Image (cartoon, rainbow, N blue to C red):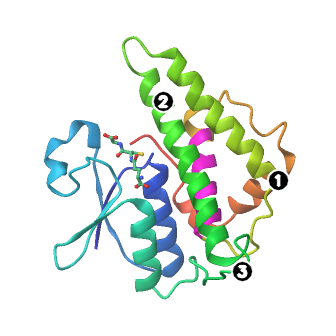
Amino acid sequence: MKLYSNAASPFARKCRIVAHELGLKLEEIRTLPMQDEEFRRINPLGKIPALVLDDGSALIDSPVICEYLNSYGGGKFFPGMNIWRPTNGRWKALGLQALGDGIADAAVAYVVEGRQPSPNEAMRVRHLAAITATLDMLERVNFAKDPTIGEIAVGCALGYVEFRLPDLDWKGSRPKLSDWYARLCEYPAMKATAPAAP
Ligand SMILES: N[C@@H](CCC(=O)N[C@@H](CS)C(=O)NCC(=O)O)C(=O)O
């Protein structure tokens, strides 16, 4: 299996963590999607990550890829259904994944906008508001002891914020979240996939 990714992407990192935890070998193909029009032959949306399977078919979007890798490797990152308690099991994990991915989406958009010749500051303020309000919400979350895809997505989003928005002091006013994140960062899969310049 080939994973189109780069070392900075919080979305690709989710896939790399799931693969690492399940002992799955991924051939990583590094790309800068904004400068690689050829890559649209694999993902017409032009976004990483994309996973190309051995039969040549491609999966896109990190939630889909992570769920595929989880099934393929017999993992437990996507808990079972529990229709009676949406704050438990699968729905909690998927809800947390949406929050983590949402922070990552806003943070990537914030960074990309900041690199424009004339950044739209109103848009950047809006992205920042999404990030800080979601961090406030996460301060009130009880995370699972055994990380699910939700904890992985939140961890990758926080890692990206730390890497690309180092001046955002999010830890001081969110002690519970920052302690939990520090513990999560001790996992070998987190250490092996720390973000770096692409
Ligand atoms: N929903 C997608 C988001 C992927 C995404 O936004 N990837 C960024 C890199 S971190 C990208 O490829 N951006 C290129 C572009 O938007 O043209 C996922 O979860 O995989």
Above or below, comparing residue 179 to residue 119 in the picture: below
> Marks 3/2: CA distance?
40 Å
Disc 2 packing (10 Å; few <14; some 14–19; many ≥20):
some
Q: Amino acid at mark 1?
A: Arg
Residue located at (43% from left, 24% from top): 113
Q: Main secondary structure of the magenta part?
A: helix
Task: Name the residue located 48 percent from the left edge and 57 percent from the top edge.
Answer: 13
Q: Quadrant of residue 57?
A: bottom left
- Pick the residue in front: 44 or 187: 44
Residue that appears at 76% across and 65% down: 143
Q: CA distance from mark 1 to mark 2?
A: 26 Å
Location of residue 195 with respect to 2 vertically, above or below: above
Say which label, 1 or 2, has the lower sequence index. 2
Name the N-terminal-most of marks 3 and 1: 3
Q: Nearer the viewer, residue 117 or 127?
A: 127
The residue identified by callout 1 is: 140
Name the residue beneath numbered marker 3: 84
User: Residue at coordinates 40% horizontally, 84% vertically from top-left?
Assistant: 72
Residue 134: x percent and y percent? Answer: 68, 44
Q: Which amino acid type is marked by label 3? A: Trp
